[in-house]
Image (cartoon, rainbow, N blue to C red):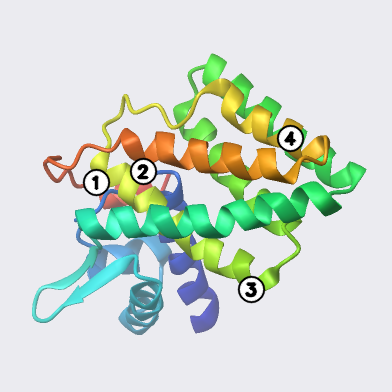
Amino acid sequence: MAENAESRIVEGVIAAILEQRLKAGTKLSEPELCEIYDCSRTDVRRALVVLATRKTVELKRNRGAFVRIPSQPEAHNVFQARRAIEKTLARNAAQGATKADLAELDGLVQAEVDARRNSDRARAIRLSGEFHVVLAKLGQNDVLAEFLHELIMRSSLIIGFFAGSNHVLCQDNEHGEIAAAIRSGDGQKASDLVEAHLRHIEAQLVFDTVPETSDLRRILTR
């Protein structure tokens, strides 16, 4: 039961970060997390340690746990690392993607476009992240894919902190163009498009952002 509670907390916090609902700087109150997840403080503390090792939470002595606030140099480093890794995975995907892989990628692209057209920002954000997770899976390198999963989570936190609610994550056609390059087997084009896509996202970040915290109970119980 304790392990289940711990995993639910970790998964809930990470999901909220990936969907950019949980903002950097938000205090993760132990009593509040106990109530939200109906668990003990021991469960909460274990979960917070796991989140801290994933660089999403900062544990401050005598103050508690907070969603980690990324620095500007860290933001640049994370996106630089994503470009290096994801370009390789995109090239690999173009060389080995199956029809089923391509269908999954195309389905995500269309679902994301539909979400944008319906002004469903939360769903569009989640699908955008899923596109990159699936791209990592198709990249035929489990080690790089594991690194990329962490970077995707960290970049979601960065985007959520350094971009406002009107931030455009990417143009409707960017993921579609990447998927098309992979479908055609053009690894170099897929790699180049991934780099341009990630640079476009990074270029929209505003580094004089004033910290904005989240309503923890509302975010994690939705």
- Residue at image position (45%, 50%) is 18
Between the C-alphas of marks 1 and 3, the distance is: 33 Å
Which of pointers 3 and 2 indicates the residue nearer the eye?
3
Outermost residue on the left side: it is 62
Q: Which residue is mark 4?
A: 181
Residue 211 against residue 138 in the figure, above or below: above
Between the C-alphas of marks 3 and 2, the distance is: 28 Å
Give the class, few, some or many, for how many residues have Cα within 10 Å of label 1's Cα (few <14, many ≥20).
Answer: some
Q: Which residue is mark 2?
A: 21
Label 3 with label 2: CB-CB less than 8 Å: no
Label 1 with label 3: CB-CB less than 8 Å: no
Q: Tag 1: residue type?
A: Ser
- Residue at image position (40%, 72%) is 54
Q: Earlier in the sequence, mark 3 or mark 2?
A: 2
Q: Which residue is mark 3?
A: 143
Between the C-alphas of marks 4 and 2, the distance is: 32 Å
- Residue at image position (38%, 58%) is 78
Q: Secondary structure at mark 4?
A: helix
Which of pointers 4 and 2 indicates the residue nearer the eye?
4
Label 4 with label 1: CB-CB less than 8 Å: no
Which of pointers 1 and 3 indicates the residue nearer the eye?
3
Q: Earlier in the sequence, mark 1 or mark 3?
A: 3
- Residue at image position (40%, 26%) is 168
Q: Is residue 220 visible?
A: no
Between the C-alphas of marks 4 and 1, the distance is: 39 Å
Q: Secondary structure at mark 2?
A: loop
Classify residue 57 by image quadrant.
bottom left
Give the class, few, some or many, for how many residues have Cα within 10 Å of label 4's Cα (few <14, many ≥20).
Answer: many
Give the percent coordinates (x, y) of residue 174.
58, 28
Q: Earlier in the sequence, mark 2 or mark 1?
A: 2
Give the percent coordinates (x, y) of residue 143.
63, 73
